[in-house]
Amino acid sequence: MTSRDTTLLLAAPITWADRLATPLAEIAPEFKVFVRDRDCYEPEAVDYVLGTGAAPGFLSTLPNLKLVFSLGAGVDGFLSDPYFPKQVPLVRFVDRNLSRAMTQYIVLQVLIHYRQQRLFDLAQAERKWEPMAPPRCTEETRIGILGLGEIGRKAGERLRDLDFDVAGWSRSRKALPGIESFAGADELKPFLSRTDILVCVLPLTPDTSGVLNQELFSVLPQDAFVINVARGGHLVERDLIESLDSGHLSGAALDVFAVEPLPKSSPLWTHPKVTITPHVAGVANPRAASLWVRDTVARYKSREPIANVVDFTRGY
Amino acid sequence: MTSRDTTLLLAAPITWADRLATPLAEIAPEFKVFVRDRDCYEPEAVDYVLGTGAAPGFLSTLPNLKLVFSLGAGVDGFLSDPYFPKQVPLVRFVDRNLSRAMTQYIVLQVLIHYRQQRLFDLAQAERKWEPMAPPRCTEETRIGILGLGEIGRKAGERLRDLDFDVAGWSRSRKALPGIESFAGADELKPFLSRTDILVCVLPLTPDTSGVLNQELFSVLPQDAFVINVARGGHLVERDLIESLDSGHLSGAALDVFAVEPLPKSSPLWTHPKVTITPHVAGVANPRAASLWVRDTVARYKSREPIANVVDFTRGY
């Protein structure tokens, strides 16, 4: 083996690939790096793929693929490929920077809603001095985190420390100090019916696709607020607009959409109860991602256990 | 002594006094309660005053006054009275609800700025999908808390837990895990020059009046952001506008103003870099305030020590 025997293919938009190239060259100079959408490479040479997803069938054209690195916490961009080579481990990037950024975003949107910042913005635009207290006190404002992975846990802890009443729902029960844990299908409705501000951080799987729909919204209390930072595929956008327009939901903050960029024709853009951000809640840090790839490849080569390998039956 | 021997005068706007009357009647039914601006009462009968401040000379007309309760953490509304009867202890309301509300407000305004929510709001209004990462990473974003009392400490801790680089400045040095402490006049400049987001939670005293001025702003790094949740008297509004317009400061979030309500003619209302809220960062909870008054009166009567008595030489 020579020092040039490791070939990494970047399966990400070119702007992303460019942001990765510099730290990768510095941190893992022994890697030969190609960008899928730009460079020429031999499919047989590719050892590793790093990216956000791949077109159906693409990965199966790489006969010597050893590992696939998902740059985001969500792996639906890879698992939506029916030809995904399941003998190849798919590894999720679970990163302090990423979960920190997601946590900040969640805390921000909860506080904008709870502290009525939108109303103050409108009042400011009209030079109106209109003091208002939050409609209910903090400890009676119930946050519900749908998905208690790394990000859901962190966000729940920070909101708990700000004195909100925080609960979470996940497949299996979790023990988190000060955060009530609901688990499994049977406890979804009790969880929703006690949730004033719902935060979706679920992985996108066939089970969770379209979970934010009319039926779920109807179980939330009157004036509930919805924050989706997971995937556009979780949300039935038409159902959300209906529940907002009927007056049942008081608002929503959305970072992810069924189609991204969100088409100009989408009624979400101008809905007075909706905050739109362009998929910015969490962005992987290129340097941290480079370190993770280098270290994981080293572990793979020395046959050590690798963290955050996706369970194909669970889908995350 | 009969059960009617305790007379409390509410020296607060009538709307505030009305919010206090119900919990006070329930929690301290033995108190005889009068509202200064509405009820007839004999000055000699007044044992205690509860309020946000008093006109110069007013308190000195109450010959049997035993304690003055300041409903807010800031006591400048009382201390600005040159005839304040200094033999009467002035007690500050230091309340979990109040410091919690202030902390939420500070975290909210820090995150709106750091996560560029205003730019996303503008982009949404134009249906523009423009992903942007924060200009610097969280751990290199330096928060500076001017004033490390109860509120400053709490806010610093929550921002530290969100992974910001937090420091605080106060008269005497504090030992707060993960928060760098700067102390005294000599360390103000070093503190300011390392501060990207300055949060003012100082008490308003002759020493701190007008502290947020051109000279201070000039020591902050280029593109610093200023949050004032203390008192309008801390800020020289004209200097702030100059530092924003020169491009040195990137923005400000203001909850308090030299004149409140902020006059319609103020240029702050429409300044594109300024967020205005109508003195809502922290509002005392009437029930918690009633419990505090009842318990403090009981301690006073049984000659037990009382917490949060204002030091007239320090002014807070």
Image (cartoon, coloured by chain):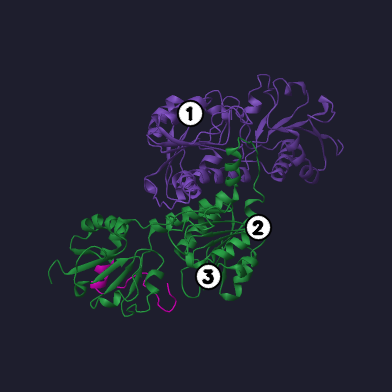
Chain colours: A purple, B green
Question: Gap between marks 1 and 2, in whole Å?
Answer: 38 Å
Identity, as a three-letter code, of the amino acid under mark 3: Gly
The disc numbered 1 marks a residue on which chain?
A
The residue most toward the right is A2
Identify the residue under disc 2: B223
Q: Secondary structure under badge 3?
A: loop
Magenta stretch containing residue B179, yes or no? no
Residue A204 relative to residue B304: left or right: right
Disc 3 packing (10 Å; few <14; some 14–19; many ≥20): many
> Does residue B153 appear in the picture of this structure?
yes
* Between B7 and B156, the one nearer to me in the picture: B7
Residue A269 relative to residue B257: left or right: right
Say if A307 sits above or below A314 in the image.
below
Query: What are the residue bounds of the magenta stretch?
Result: B296-316
The residue most toward the left is B2
Q: Secondary structure under badge 2?
A: loop
Identify the residue under disc 1: A241
> Does residue A199 appear in the picture of this structure?
no
Question: Gap between marks 3 and 1, in whole Å?
Answer: 48 Å
The disc numbered 2 marks a residue on which chain?
B
Query: Depth-wise, is mark 3 or mark 1 nearer the camera?
Result: 3
Say if A142 sits above or below B274 in the image.
above
Disc 2 packing (10 Å; few <14; some 14–19; many ≥20): some
Identify the residue under disc 3: B210
Identity, as a three-letter code, of the amino acid under mark 2: Asp
Which quadrant: the C terminus of chain B? Answer: bottom left
Query: Exactly how many numbered labels are in the figure?
Result: 3
